[in-house]
Amino acid sequence: MKITLNHQEVCQIYRTKPEERSRGGFQSFMVSLQGRLKHNEIDLTGDDLEKIERYSQYDNGGYEGRLRKAFGRHLPHIFGVVKQTQEFF
């Protein structure tokens, strides 16, 4: 699944420093995404989507918040985001 991120979304992915890779699964995942990000595009695999969904189940806070900010616009079904529509009368 190829997606195009805006500047703020890209910044969320780069919040994890490469030297933090060995600190845990989430950090390793975020650094791996950094390596695959080309400008502002990334091709998410099925494994990536599975990890995003799993990490998004953590309590609201660090991991979940970063993932929501990076991918919530693209993966609303994972984050329970309902797109708002405007009704004109």
Image (cartoon, helix red, strand yellow):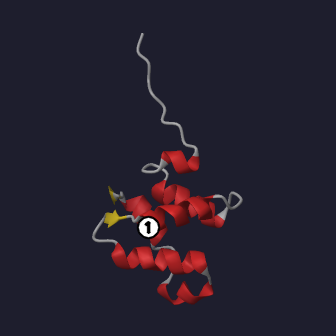
Q: Which residue is found at the position 33% from the left and 65% from the top?
A: 43
* Label 1 Cα crowd, 10 Å radius (few <14 / some 14-19 / many 20+): some
In which quadrant of the rendered image does the C terminus lie? Answer: top left
Q: In the picture, residue 33 is in which quadrant?
A: bottom left
Q: Is residue 5 above or below residue 18?
A: above
Q: Residue furthest top?
A: 89
User: Residue 32 at x, y = what percent?
Assistant: 44, 79
Count of all numbered marks drawn on residues in the image: 1
| Element assignment for label 1 | helix
In which quadrant of the rendered image does the N terminus lie? Answer: bottom left
Q: Residue furthest front?
A: 46
- Observer able to see residue 33: yes
Using the image as rendered, state which of residue 49 and residue 21 is in the foreground. 49
Q: Which residue is found at the position 49% from the left and 51% from the top?
A: 72
Q: Residue furthest right?
A: 59
Task: Residue type at mark 1: give it.
Answer: Cys
Q: Which residue is found at the position 50% from the left and 82% from the top?
A: 17
Q: Is residue 18 above or below residue 80?
A: below
Using the image as rendered, state which of residue 68 and residue 2 is in the foreground. 2
Residue tagged by mark 1?
11
User: Residue 48 at x, y = what percent?
Assistant: 46, 67
Q: In the picture, residue 5 is in which quadrant?
A: bottom left
User: Residue 29 at x, y = what percent?
Assistant: 51, 76
User: Residue 61 at x, y = what percent?
Assistant: 67, 61
- Observer able to see residue 16: no
